Image (spheres, grey):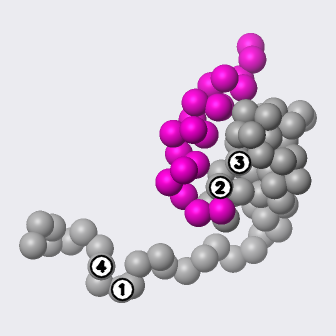
Amino acid sequence: MDVEPSLAAKFSALLPHVDERTQRLYLGSEARSLGQGGIAAVARAAGMSRQTVAAGVDELESGATPLERVRRAGRGVSGWPR
């Protein structure tokens, strides 16, 4: 089964809404899940370079500490709506 059309549909829906780092990590996670040949398949489906996808895989596998909170403390949805 050719997964690239399915990946391309997912990528076109999500990637315009996230920053470059999140794009790399998402593409890297998809490539890892595909196994051998995943980097090339994801790169083709996303229209990005293999180096970008490989960088995402490397970041995920590096064990680096995830970024801290995106929102300031106290900005959650508790008490919604106000």
- Circles 2 and 3, Cβ within 8 Å, touching? The answer is yes
Q: In the rendered image, which residue does mark 1 sit on?
A: 73
Q: In the rendered image, which residue does mark 2 sit on?
A: 23
**Residue 81 location in percent, x, y?**
11, 66
**Residue 10 location in percent, x, y?**
57, 35
Residue 58's place in the image compared with 9, above or below, is below
- The residue positioned 74% from the left and 13% from the top of the image is 1
- Which is the main secondary structure of the residues drawn in magenta? helix
- The residue positioned 58% from the left and 30% from the top of the image is 9
Distance Cα–Cα, label 3 vs label 4 = 29 Å
Dividing the picture into quadrants, the one containing residue 8 is: top right
At label 3, the amino acid type is Leu
Q: Which mark is residue 75?
A: 4
Q: Which mark is residue 27?
A: 3
Q: Secondary structure at mark 3?
A: helix
- Circles 3 and 1, Cβ within 8 Å, touching? The answer is no
- Circles 1 and 4, Cβ within 8 Å, touching? The answer is yes
At label 4, the amino acid type is Arg
**Residue 32 location in percent, x, y?**
78, 44
Q: Foreground: 49 or 74?
A: 49
Distance Cα–Cα, label 1 vs label 4 = 6 Å
Residue 3's place in the image compared with 34, above or below, is above
Q: Which mark is residue 47?
A: none
Dot placed on the residue nearer the N-terminal end, 3 or 4? 3
Mark 3 burial class by Cα count in 10 Å: few <14, some 14-19, many 20+: many
From the viewer's perspective, is the residue at label 3 or at label 1 nearer? 3
From the viewer's perspective, is the residue at label 4 or at label 2 nearer? 2
Distance Cα–Cα, label 2 vs label 3 = 6 Å
**Residue 29 location in percent, x, y?**
71, 48
Where are the magenta residues, as a range? 1-20
Is residue 17 on the magenta stretch? yes
